[in-house]
Amino acid sequence: MEKGDEALRGAVRRLASPAPGREEGEGARSLASRLDDRGCAYGRVTNARLEEVARGYERLEGKLNAVLLAVTGTFLSSLVGMVLYHLRGG
C-alpha cells in the first residue's frame, strides 16, 4: 500500500511542477492572453445562451404588444360605439 501511495505522490509532484525550461507563471500568462483574445468556451456558450434568451424575450414582447394593441383597439371601438349610441338618443 505504501508503494502505491508513494507512486501517486510522485505523479502528483511531477504534474504540479513546471515543465523544464519554463517559468512557473509562463503557462498562466499565455493561457490568460489566449483566453483574452478568443474568450473561453464557457463564456462563448453562456453568451450564445443569453443571446437566445434575449431573442426569445423580444419575440414574446412583440407578441404581447400585438395582443395588447388588439384588446385596446377593441375596447376603444366599443367605447366609441356606445358613446354614439347614447348621443343619438338610443
Image (cartoon, grey):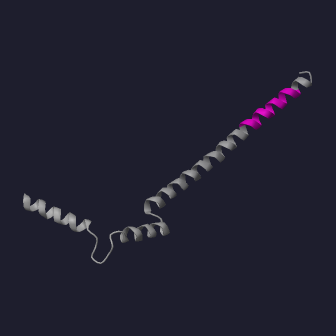
Where does residue 18 sit, x and y in percent of width and height?
Answer: 28, 70
Name the outermost residue toward the right.
88
- In the image, 83: left or right of 41? right
Query: Is the C terminus in the top left, top right, bottom left or bottom right quadrant?
Result: top right
Camera-side residue: 66 or 6? 6
Camera-side residue: 49 or 60? 49
Where does residue 87 sit, x and y in percent of width and height?
Answer: 91, 25
Q: Residue at x 86, y 27 (%)?
A: 83
In this rendering, the count of numbered labels is 0
Where does residue 84 sit, x and y in percent of width and height?
Answer: 88, 28
- In the image, 60: left or right of 73? left
Q: Residue at x 50, y 55 (%)?
A: 49
When the figure is inspected, residue 65 is found, relative to residue 33, above or below; the finding is: above
Q: Quadrant of residue 89?
A: top right
When the figure is inspected, residue 56 is found, relative to residue 43, above or below; the finding is: above
When the figure is inspected, residue 76 is found, relative to residue 87, above or below; the finding is: below
Name the outermost residue toward the bottom.
21
Q: Main secondary structure of the magenta part?
A: helix
Q: Residue at x 32, y 75 (%)?
A: 22
Query: Is the N terminus in the top left, top right, bottom left or bottom right quadrant?
Result: bottom left
When the figure is inspected, residue 11 is found, relative to residue 87, above or below; the finding is: below
Name the outermost residue toward the top.
89
Magenta residues span 71-84
- In the image, 88: left or right of 48? right
Q: Residue at x 72, y 36 (%)?
A: 71
> Can residue 32 be found in the magenta stretch?
no
Q: Quadrant of residue 41?
A: bottom left
Camera-side residue: 85 or 8? 8
Where does residue 27 sit, x and y in percent of width and height?
Answer: 36, 70
